[in-house]
Amino acid sequence: MIGADKTAGQVARRRVFYIPGYDPVPARRYREMYRKEGAAQAEISGYHLTLSPKQGRGAYGWQVQAEIDGASVQAEVEMLIWADIVRGSMAQGIPATYLQLARTAWVYIGSGALFRLMRLRKGPILAALYPIVMLLVQLGLTCLAGLAAGALVAKLAPLAVAVLVGLAVVPLGLRWFRALDGRFLAYYLMHDYAHTAQARGALPADLAARMVVFRQSIAEALRTEVDEVLVVGHSSGAHLAVGVLADLLRAGEGPAAGGPVLAFLSLGHVIPMVSFLPAAWKLRDDLAFLSTRDDLTWVDVTAPGDGAAFSLCDPVAVSGVAPGGRRWPLVISAAFTQTLSPERWRALRWRFFRLHFQYLSAFDRPRDYDYFRITAGPLTLAARYAGRAASKSRIERPLSRYTSRAA
């Protein structure tokens, strides 16, 4: 299919920009995930995908050649990377992490955001409370171990020696727990929420600067001879994508007549964790701005089975900034319990972190959500979901205490 008809929603060439969430892993891990899960979905759904290295310089990415529904499609996937910022924010010592814990808890509790977020979905709030509870448990256990060690030594040595031994056990125990954080994920999640809350919802300067680079990459793609430019934001990457796209359109860098169409796919979003905070005025303004645009398509996909996301929560409406004439987002469910077989669902049900990435993975009972058809298939996002009704169980009740859209 050469020279695809944009008016009919057909795609022969696509540029995809993927913004990950708060994740320190190298970009190549996402390429491997796309390769593995894409091959699995292709086998299940009866189409063909092949990956090859990205041509030319620039950000990390890969090429996809697809044969889907009798059409040949070329897609170039590019990672918009901020893992270095994530790693920098995670480079905290143990005492600094406990200080982050106190500050983050105060931001969410003191602002009242925590209690309003709990009225949306309890799953992501339990996920947010988990690192706090786990780190406090670790501290309590090491203190008890220190007391026990001191009491034992006190029977054999002077009290001063027993006190020193007991005090030495505590940092040793905390370092032991941190060494095992690949299993517990308490430090990782604590750094994640602390990074979100550090400026009470405002963008940190380093991240704001990186988002300007993201915007420039997308603007450049919109001037190339492709049929669709698709921006995908997963988890925390969803609210970054909202900011990037709003700034791009405000700057007059959006789609031009006869050029590629612009689409936005948000997956497993946690937008209320930011938009409910006092200083998130720009994000709230960006949400309201994007929701009325007719020069992009915005589809939001979550699933109740994903306990780390605000599933089926319309991020514009629940943030209390839904304007009149709102068009977006189209909120739909990936419906894990229906799109995964009972056997597959049982295998994944309690793997909470893995389920948060299911949107990027294969479904063995796919319905109308298929990440690989969206990113490498022959239809634009607008054409794929044309006439699709929003989920009836979506949540639109405005619950944010803070709705200001200016500082």
Image (spheres, rainbow, N blue to C red):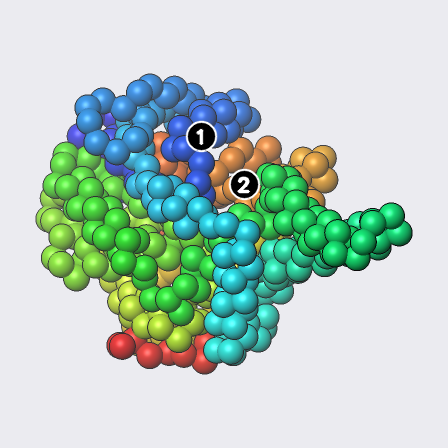
* Residue 240 coordinates in the image, percent (x, y): 34, 54
Name the side, left or right, on which 396 lies relative to 164.
left
Outermost front residue = 158
- Mark 1 nearby-residue class (10 Å; few <14, some 14–19, many ≥20): few
Q: Residue at x 19, y 55 (%)?
A: 248
Q: Residue at x 27, y 24 (%)?
A: 54
* Residue 170 coordinates in the image, percent (x, y): 68, 52
Q: Looking at the rendering, which quadrant does residue 125 occupy?
A: bottom right
Counting every numbered tag in the picture gives 2
The residue that mark 1 highlights is 29
**In terms of secondary structure, where does tag 1 sit?**
helix
The residue that mark 2 highlights is 358
Label 1 sits on what residue type?
Arg
* Residue 97 coordinates in the image, percent (x, y): 52, 56
**In terms of secondary structure, where does tag 2 sit?**
helix
Q: Nearer the viewer, residue 390 or 317?
A: 317
Label 2 sits on what residue type?
Gln
Q: Is residue 45 visible?
A: no
- Marks 2 and 1, how far apart in space? 15 Å
CB-based contact (under 8 Å), mark 2 and mark 1: no
Q: Is residue 196 visible?
A: yes
Which quadrant of the figure contains the N terminus? top left
Please determine whether, in this image, residue 397 is positioned above or below residue 138. Answer: below
Which quadrant of the figure contains the C terminus? bottom left
Q: Nearer the viewer, residue 335 or 111?
A: 111
Name the side, left or right, on which 351 lies relative to 264.
right
Q: Residue at x 70, y 36 (%)?
A: 347
Please determine whether, in this image, residue 2 is positioned above or below residue 87. Answer: above
Please determine whether, in this image, residue 46 is positioned above or below residue 115. Answer: above
Q: Earlier in the sequence, mark 2 or mark 1?
A: 1
* Residue 237 coordinates in the image, percent (x, y): 39, 50
